[in-house]
Amino acid sequence: MEQFVPILERAQGNKVERSVPKIKKNLVKRITPSRRTATKAVVHQSPESEFQQDSRQQSTARRSLDVLKFIARASSPVALADIADGLQLPKTTVHRLCLQLTAQQFLTQSVNAKGFGVGRELRTLALNTLNNDTLRSLRHQALAQLVGEVGETCNLTILDGTEVLYLDRVEARWPLRLTLEIGSRVPLHCTASGKLFLSQLDTGDRKKILDHLKLEKFTANTITNKEKLEKVITDIQRKDFSIDAEEFIPGLIALAVPIKNEDNKVIAALAVHAPTSRVPLSRIMEWLPPLKKTAKKLTSLL
């Protein structure tokens, strides 16, 4: 409010004397904002609106999903700089998101802490998604048709860390058969699906796994020599199928073929196995054409 100071006039002869009364100190304090009040007025910010909060949260969620998708597509742990370049995001933002996702076990850091890979929770999410009722029913139907064609047990597997995970399975109607429940895990180095997955890894990643993987001997045919196993894996790469010649369980043989996505990347394996008392190893290649046909059918269901 504008302040008006009265002017006092007093006649002294021919002169008019004017005087201005002194302003009280408390009035000065009242009309002059303190330095502290002025500072507060400068730094004060209005609270974030609900729209701004929603927009920021959606942006963070979208970027987190982009990071997960980028890493899931890679065949090995991805360096922070590569993620930032690939997604066109600031490195600090990617680092923050990766640490948050690692804390929630959706991602895992590599041993040397130079890259991020798929974590346990992301694998579980992927497995639960694959086991969605509709997709699982269609996959199971395709497996059942294959079993009817080849007359032997067929299974669908995925790579889970350093093991093979059974995603789905249809048993043949024979009294003599091996029963492995869905969710069972088997070794990499001595199973048809396991060796197939090893053949699809980058040379460096495969070497790291084999350097730390215990090549346990299960049967007389199990390959426990790393150099020999490397030669077998190279042969599998060339042929694009894998055979288990009684390497995991005595008297059991198997044949596995890859299931690939649109980018020609192996995402799962389709295998059939049978006891040698019913099917000799010499007949195993009879299963190859129906397995490849069903593998193509399953591509759209994964």
Image (cartoon, rainbow, N blue to C red):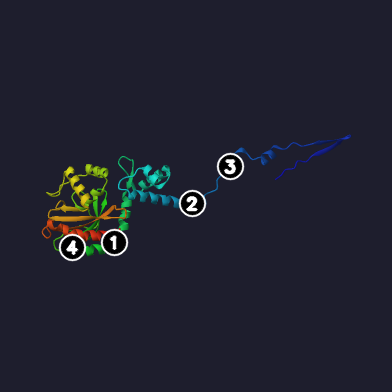
Residues tagged 1 and 2 counted as in contact (Cβ below 8 A): no
- Determine which residue is flagged by label 3: 42
The residue under the point 17% across, 55% down is 254
The residue under the point 61% across, 38% down is 35
- Label 2: state its secondary structure: helix
Nearer to us: label 4 or label 1: 4
Category of crowding for the residue at label 2, using alpha-carbon neighbours closer than 10 angstroms: few (below 14), some (14–19), many (at least 20): few
Q: Is residue 74 left or right of residue 245?
A: right
Nearer to us: label 3 or label 4: 4
Nearer to us: label 1 or label 3: 1
Residues tagged 4 and 2 counted as in contact (Cβ below 8 A): no
Nearer to us: label 1 or label 2: 1
Q: Give the vertical position of 151 relative to 62 (above or below).
A: below
Residue projecting furthest to the front? 238
Q: Check disc 4 and give the amino acid type.
A: Val
Q: Nearer the viewer, residue 15 or 226?
A: 226
Q: Nearer the viewer, residue 141 or 48?
A: 141
Q: Check disc 3 and give the amino acid type.
A: Val
Mark closer to the chain start, 1 or 2: 2
- Label 1: state its secondary structure: helix
- Label 4: state its secondary structure: helix
Residue 183 position within the rendered picture, expressed as x and y whole percent measured from the top left: 25, 56
- Determine which residue is flagged by label 4: 150
Question: Which disc number belongs to residue 136?
Answer: 1
Residue projecting furthest to the left? 277
